[in-house]
Image (tube, rainbow, N blue to C red):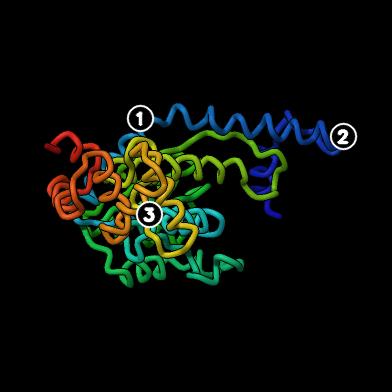
Amino acid sequence: MSMKLAGSLIERRSSTTAEIDRLSTRDMLNLINQEDKLVTEAVTPCLDDITRLVDRAVVTLGQGGRVVLIGAGASGRNAVLAAGEYAPDEQHPLVGLIAGGALAMLHDMRDAAQDYNRGVLDLQAIGFTQKDMLIALTVGGKTPWLWGAMRHAWSLGATRAAITRNPQSEATELADIVIAPQTGSEVVAGYGNPKAILAQKMVLNMLTTGLAVRTGRVYSNMRVDIRNNTTQMAERQIAIVMAAGGCTRTVAKAALESCDHNCKTAVLMVLTGMDAWKAHALLAQNNGFVRVALQEAP
């Protein structure tokens, strides 16, 4: 190990957990839990920057662009999972890319993460344009694949953001928006970066939830964009219509069946008494926002 790497490892050691190997299991877990609580506190000072991130992403989607989440290793897995869980649509405007592709979700693909040119090629492969927005997830900001992707986005004039623990890195220099929760030393030095990765997940949760709300996928505090492609999801649709409309299961099922199981339309039908065609048309006029459509309902 070089002197530089050794020094870096020593700097990352936590004095709070220096005796963790001497603790009982219960005390050890309590210490880890206390350290995890610090992650939430680290995210709080970043709320203004996260607000900029969400608002910029909403504008991007509103103008027909996509929000592309990228990362390598654990950061890349965060990116792919967040994009995949955002919406039930087979094709929706959140895209997740991980260095090394699908195999990297299960295997270590360090060579791919070190390939600058591949970062460029991976963005080109999805047809990334100036209309899109790139959000890079990285703990240290020192991944060549990530730099390649970010520099390509920069060359196109696309908006770029970085979610990282390191506020001063090659990645942040290429970003328009930098979100850098200072999560501090990990519980065990050299055992991954669980606190930094947890902070990423918190920010991504704010981003995806914020986008769902701001793009009309949510009414009150319920997702109303779900589809009935499985028995479980069909039951969830019924439960949502019942909760949103304050109606019986029979009424909710009838509304869903009459509008081809479009959850938003069914909710509006139950709340207003409109038929399926009129409810669907009113939603279309209001960009799919149930709350706005309700305000304009006769």
Say which amino acid is labelled 1.
Asp
C-alpha distance separating marks 2 and 3: 46 Å
Crowding at dot 2, Cα within 10 Å, few <14 / some 14-19 / many 20+, comes out as few
Q: Which residue is mark 2?
A: 24
Helix, strand or loop status at disc 1: helix
Crowding at dot 3, Cα within 10 Å, few <14 / some 14-19 / many 20+, comes out as some
C-alpha distance separating marks 1 and 2: 40 Å
Say which amino acid is labelled 3.
Ile
From the top left corner, tell me how far across and down residue 153 is, in percent.
29, 58
Looking at the image, residue 45 lies above or below residue 215: above
Q: Is residue 172 visible?
A: no
Looking at the image, residue 130 lies above or below residue 34: below
Which disc is residue 226 wearing? 3
From the top left corner, tell me how far across and down residue 177 is, in percent.
33, 41
Q: Quadrant of residue 294?
A: top left
The quarter in which the N terminus is drawn is: bottom right
Drawn side of residue 25 relative to residue 160, left or right: right
The residue positioned 81% from the left and 35% from the top of the image is 20
The quarter in which the C terminus is drawn is: top left
The residue positioned 26% from the left and 43% from the top of the image is 56
Helix, strand or loop status at disc 3: loop
Using the image as rendered, state which of residue 102 and residue 221 is in the foreground. 221
Q: Which residue is mark 1?
A: 48
Q: Earlier in the sequence, mark 2 or mark 3?
A: 2
Q: Quadrant of residue 39?
A: top right
Using the image as rendered, state which of residue 273 and residue 140 is in the foreground. 273
